[in-house]
Image: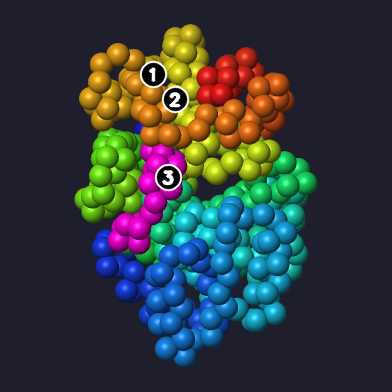
Amino acid sequence: MSGFDILTAGRVSFGRGRASEAAGAIHARGTRVLLLRGGHAGADRLAAELRARGATVEEIRQAGEPLIDDLDAVVARGRESRIDVVAALGGGSAIDMAKAAAALIPAPGGAMRHLEVVGEGRPLEAAPLPFVALPTTAGTGAEVTKNAVIGVPSHGRKVSLRDDRMLADLAIVDPALTDAAPRGVTLASGLDAVTQVIEPYLSCRATPFTDALCRDAIPRGLAALMRLMRQESETARDDLALTSLFGGLALANAGLGAVHGFAGVLGGRVGAPHGALCGRLLPGVLRANARAVAGQGGDMTRHHEVAGWIAAALGEGGDPLDALEAWIDGCGLPRLGAMGVPAAEIPDLAEASRASSSMRGNPVELPLAALEAALRDSL
């Protein structure tokens, strides 16, 4: 057995009602708070509780996925206000923006000094500020990952700011914060959560630690998401939140794969939501990987296991990946073409995706023709 490391947040608190811990935990880490937030009412309560404890709170609403110009503005505001602790209560976009701000406010340089692919990719030169994360969607698992995804429109890419020290000091995962999520958000974020336990399980960098998480989370997440598309359920919300958490833990320690390799490029080019892209790409990428592994005479055990979990969740016969794609269609998720991905650009998009850091975790290196086929599968 090969050795491995485990990277995660300093502390993880999971369970309904755990959001009540947040104000005290944040205030214990600093009194000048930068709060990145979405529209969830819980952010209003958290800001009020912090002010009642004597903290000053700079609130910034994060609308949409983080862009580099917005990040620069948030960092400048944080430096001007002498922020000493950063918190996020929102979806993955708010958490990523907060995580990046916590990393860069103390840094001597700007974001491009540290961004992968389009920047210099340098390690951080100063320790990040304390950071507390509370997700309000079950999807990205960003509360327990060491990177923040930032859009760079001038390069047409979404790339990561990444450093082991960017892990949150405290991640509070309270499934009750996800109860109000609209159906469309639940679908897209839930498909992202499921993808983020499937890809680490199939990853060439999988470990016994990540395998244990993914074997529990793949069937749990599939069943929960399919139940939530039929009816509201606290139990299913809890299960999907746990799947998202396990996905964050797994991807931080085993990497991802071609779904996320594509998603970063496509998101940067067409601006489509990350979760929707991942959900739409998943069946086509699973087909491409299975064909490639089988064609090389590789071990198909894990691919068959994933297909079996999908079939069990859907309760249908026939090809599990065809059935999954039909279920996604039936839930109303647009295909890539409807998200603005032009068929004529598939060769260029496939070529650009090969350089993505996520591709390094794919179970097999896919040739360009296979990458193009996976994209066409999802148009």
| Residue depicted at x 56% and y 52% | 147
Disc 3: CA contacts within 10 A as few (<14), some (14-19) or many (>=20): some
Q: Which of marks 3 and 1 is nearer the N terminus?
A: 3
Left or right, 232 with respect to 132, comes to: left
Q: Nearer the viewer, residue 71 or 146?
A: 71
Q: Does the magenta stretch include residue 191?
A: yes
The kind of secondary structure element at disc 3 is helix
Give the residues in magenta. Answer: 175-194
The residues bearing labels 3 and 1 have C-alpha atoms spaced at a distance of: 21 Å
> Quick one: label 2 or label 3, which is nearer the N terminus?
3
Write the residue at 38% across / 29% down. Answer: 330
Whether tag 2 and tag 1 are in contact, CB under 8 A, the answer is yes
The residue wearing badge 2 is: 283
Q: State the CA–CA distance, disc 2 to disc 1.
A: 8 Å
Residue type, label 2: Pro
Number of the label disc, if any, that sits on residue 184: 3
Would you say residue 326 sits in the magenta stretch? no
Which mark is first along the chain, 1 or 2?
A: 2
Foreground label between 3 and 1: 3
Q: Is the magenta stretch mostly helix, strand or loop?
A: helix
Residue type, label 1: Asp
Residue 285 appearing in the image: yes
How many marks can you see?
3
Residue corresponding to mark 1: 322
